Image (cartoon, rainbow, N blue to C red):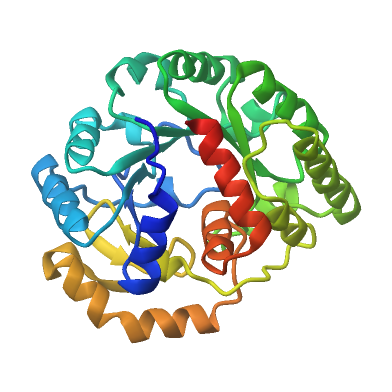
Amino acid sequence: MKTPAPLPLKALWQLKAKNRPIILSHGINSKCNLHCKFCPYWKEDKGEMSKEEVFALLEEAKSLGIMLYNAWTTEPLLRKDLPEILKHAHHLGMMTSLVTNGVLLKKRVGELSNLDFLSVSVDGIKVHEELRGVKLDKVLDGIKEARDGGITAVINCVISGKNLDEIEELIHLAQELGVWISFEPLHEYEDIPQEVWEDVGIRDMRKYEKTIDKIIELKEEGFPVINSKTYFRMIKNLRPDFKCRASDLILDVTSDGRIENCRVHREGLGRIGDGLNNVWNSSREMREKISTECRGCLFFGYAELALLYSLKPEVILNAIRILNGIR
């Protein structure tokens, strides 16, 4: 589905005039077929909403003015009724996106005719199997199938201490595949053992900074890097430099129907049974307090959207270029 030209204006009206979110980020399931040691989500034991409950959630989200439905955590492709859910979101007029580890992508891509944007986790060439526990070729086969099926595909790479030597090669791979590539630095969750971060965390800052400079250089040369240069310059020192807008931009719902402020703090704002509009309005002060006190994170989606919200010129121009490239 092609992105409508007035989308940025509609998003700004929704955010700044109506003070409502534009994205429903839904943890559609609670199971995963990988056990990445730096990820906390597969360890959680939660229930899952029925298809009918998800349909009701989508309908209420649409009435709130939400424009994009994003299915993620832990592995959405494990959910058999995912195609029906995406179809219902499309029927309501929402764009759809999916975040996956790609293991089941080749098997199920034929069912994803109602998917607009696909983000597949690929963290390196040789080290991908070490980090994710699955061979890269298996994931790439699915990406190729999705690309050939007309889905806008993005390789998302989490930059860690393990893959700094493979980032440039990964960008060239994205170019060869004819897909976009996005980056974000590894987030060190507090509930993951410290020895994990000593193994995979970013510790050689000089090497990391040179890697970021190289990504910027390749982006300027025209390689399909989706992040803005403003974002890369900010993450170069691993220090957030923006006012958090996650709670203003995104409605975060877990697999069991809990509404949270974001994927980092995970403060409970209410449950879907309370009504999305009611929770959104009643949690305004709490969300503002969390955002004001937050030290920030560098998740690609949160940071780029916050920079867009702040009307950073280069970020806006980059977003327009990406949208034109998708269309």
Q: Quadrant of residue 5?
A: top left
Q: Position of residue 41 (x, y in %)?
A: 43, 50
Residue in view at x 15 percent, y 57 percent: 60
**26 w.r.t. 322: above or below:** below
**311 w.r.t. 121: above or below:** below
Q: Position of residue 221 (x, y in %)?
A: 80, 33
Residue 184 located left or right of residue 19? right
Q: Is residue 46 visible?
A: yes
Q: Quadrant of residue 175?
A: top right
**180 w.r.t. 5: above or below:** above
**115 w.r.t. 263: above or below:** above
Residue in view at x 75 percent, y 39 percent: 162
Q: Position of residue 78 (x, y in %)?
A: 31, 30
Residue in view at x 47 percent, y 31 percent: 327
Q: Is residue 43 visible?
A: no
Of residue 91 and residue 72, the one placed in the foreground of this image is 91
Of residue 299 and residue 17, the one placed in the foreground of this image is 17
Q: Position of residue 143 (x, y in %)?
A: 50, 20
Quadrant including the N terminus = top left
Residue 10 located left or right of residue 258? right
Of residue 118 and residue 15, the one placed in the foreground of this image is 15
